[in-house]
Image: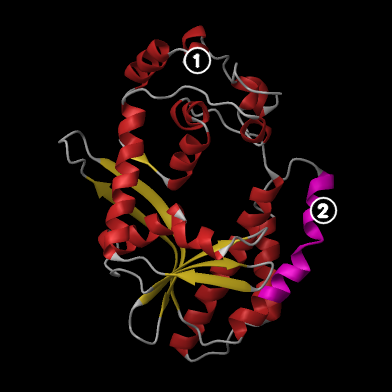
Amino acid sequence: MHERDALPVLTPEQVAAATDPAAAVALLATLGAPKRTSYSALAAYDACPYRYVLRFLLRIPGPPVAAFSFGSAAHGAFQRFTAARREAATAGTPMPGRADLDRFLEEAWATVTFPDPASEAQYRERVAPLMDAFWRMESAQPASAIAEERWFNLRLEPADGSAPVVVGGSIDRIDRLPSGAVEVIDYKTGRIESQESVDTNLQLSIYALACRDATGFGRPEKVTLWFAEHGERRSTARTDAELDGARATILDRVAAIRRGELLATPSEATCRWCDAREYCPSAIR
């Protein structure tokens, strides 16, 4: 049986929560107010609260997404390569080369799932340019990564005395800068974002907040989106005041969820890319 064929059918109460405030509050009371969250959960909530319900409260799994599989394989290769560089620098052994990077990619590729052979073949065509761009940028600088996939649990205490929430996540990469401070890096495959988008990116703010308050590295001097396919990095900074503002933003979202503000907000743009739309009675199809 296909994995998705085995999924339980949503109950009428769960379906009603998409459009009825009382049903949404009742569903939340049944499931329990969330004690943990993540950037992915908050982004889902911002896109559509009922998408958050489906994916993060009811835990309806989405189908394989080719772009996510491609990005996961790329992240795995980058992680192993920078770790190998650090280990070689420490041991005084030869640095890993381009062949090692390609090998890491192939091994990571074998662990991901694409929706179909056609989509896998399309993304295969992007592998060589991706590896070329990453190799050029990474090999041109000293081995500076001090951590890859750095997991964190950031505990936030609401000012109203309600239950704390833990923000969990993983920082793609942390580099040591010449100043002694650190740089937080998030790899991106796909299109380049504007500098304005980088300056206001909530994911980077969460990572910087976690770096300051939950990892012991301190507030990062720089936060960076590394657009791996394009060989470009766009950096910005976060002040302590901005990080405190990000904390307030997170707590505002959590408070809204805990109040049961979970109704669907359908639109053509939102529903088109929603990986849980088949379960939503309000979805625009």
Q: In the shown orientation, is residue 269 left or right of residue 47?
A: right
Task: Report the disc number at residue 122.
Answer: 2
Considering only vertical position in the picture, is 14 above or below 95?
A: above
What residue is pinned by disc 1?
19
The amino acid beneath tag 2 is Gln
Residue nearest the observer in this picture, 266 or 122: 266
**Residue 132 falls within the magenta-colored stretch:** yes
Considering only vertical position in the picture, is 189 above or below 39?
A: below
Residue span colored magenta:
117-133
Callout 1: SS: loop
**Residue 205 falls within the magenta-colored stretch:** no
Considering only vertical position in the picture, is 200 above or below 10?
A: below
Q: Quadrant of residue 174?
A: bottom left
Q: Position of residue 194 (x, y in %)?
A: 58, 62
At horizontal 36% and vertical 16% (from top left) the residue drawn is 25
Q: Position of residue 249 (x, y in %)?
A: 34, 45
Q: Quadrant of the N terminus?
A: top right
Q: Quadrant of the C terminus?
A: top right
Whole-number angstrom distance, CA of label 2 to CA of label 1: 39 Å
At horizontal 77% and vertical 62% (from top left) the residue drawn is 126
Q: Position of residue 139 (x, y in %)?
A: 61, 84
Callout 2: SS: helix
Considering only vertical position in the picture, is 121 above or below 77?
A: above
Q: Quadrant of residue 278?
A: top right
